[in-house]
Image: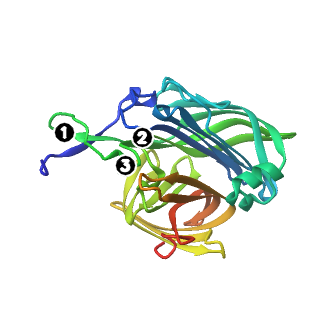
Amino acid sequence: MGDRKIITVLEPEDEYTHEPDEASNYNESMYLNAFDLDQQLGGWFRIGNRVNEGYAEMTVCIYLRDGRVGYVYARPQIDSNDKMEAGGLSIDVVEPFKHLKVRYSGTVCVLDEPGDMADPRTAFKNNPWEECEIDLDYHGTSPMYGGKPVYEDDGSEIEIEAEKSFAKAHYEQHCAVTGTIRVGDETIDMNGLGLRDKSWGPRFWQAISWYRWLPLVFSDEFAMMISIVGGKPGGMVLVGDEYHLIRNCTIESDWDDDHYQTGMRCTVETDHDSYEVTGEVLSLIPLRNRRTDPEGNELLTRITEAMTRFECRGQTGIGMSEYLDQIRDGRPIGADVV
């Protein structure tokens, strides 16, 4: 069994929803971000269908001018996994691997101090809510990265333990993004770049001890996704219209008193080239996920979501630094690592 070769497969139908596993924590998730470097504005949007638990995770996060953040998170009820639509947010596939559409009609909580979201109940109560309309088109500017690992000899899926799973399949793609984002009386005309990803399978946010995920764009022909997941490097560099896989990378982070990232210095190696990338956080919002395990222990995961400006080889780019950590004794366990 240990000698069986594993390959990664990806089909156009994977852009649509799948038949859920029996696992109670089955999650089908689509995430998209978009940034305008000139305006230093942007946002990200996510739907995670947890149909076997009867709800979806719906998130809209918009980085506004002057460091403000418009944010909403909800768990609307769902009874099927037929579509990516919940809580006023919809993600539609116009053409697989080429064109997606994101729409939202609802409200967001506008935070002058995004750090308030460390206590979400208080933040949602004490900050104003504004009407929000989103209408964005995503057009792929790159090949697809990732897919579903299977055994090559018979195409069978690799069995995973639901309790320890984050996803059984995952893929990403850099995109050009056009359209509008409106929050209250402020409208952002988006003509920028971003990244979208999709995953499906059993997921607990506590299944990974820590990760660093840096999706970033310099142009439609030069972009990266740098990741370290539990110490394992990964990702890719877009050069022209080709992805070069990252074979090794390092991330050295700077922290504030709350152990939120404020900047980072990265080294990236592919089979073709090596890069040095620096990042400076422009706006950060701390998010959390809590769960009680079967033994009654409360588990706390923190995810700091930061719009970040990047520099590499004289080029300026923009994107995200997403840092996930399990919290132990009030401290993110990855802070002493990267």
Question: Is residue 213 in sight in this rendering?
Answer: no
Identify the disc placed on residue 163.
Answer: 3
- Label 1: how many Cα within 10 Å (few below 14, some 14–19, many 20+): some
Mark 2 crowd level (few <14, some 14–19, many ≥20, 10 Å Cα)? some
Are the two marked residues, 3 and 1, in contact with CB atoms closer than 8 angstroms?
no
| Disc 3 packing (10 Å; few <14; some 14–19; many ≥20) | some
Pointer 3 or 1: first along the chain: 1
Please give left or right for residue 268 compared with residue 154 in the image.
right
Say which amino acid is labelled 2: Met
Report the Cα–Cα distance between label 3 and label 2. 28 Å
Assign a secondary structure to mark 1: loop
Could you give the CA–CA distance between mark 2 and mark 1, rounded to whole angstroms?
A: 20 Å
Q: Secondary structure at mark 2?
A: loop
- Residue nearest the observer in this picture, 148 or 157: 157
Amino acid on which the number 1 mark rests in the picture: Glu
Q: Are circles 3 and 2 on residues that touch, CB within 8 Å?
A: no
Dot 3 falls on a residue whose secondary structure is helix
Q: Which residue is mark 1?
A: 152
Q: Which residue is mark 2?
A: 144
Q: Is residue 153 visible?
A: yes
* N-terminal-most mark, 2 or 1: 2
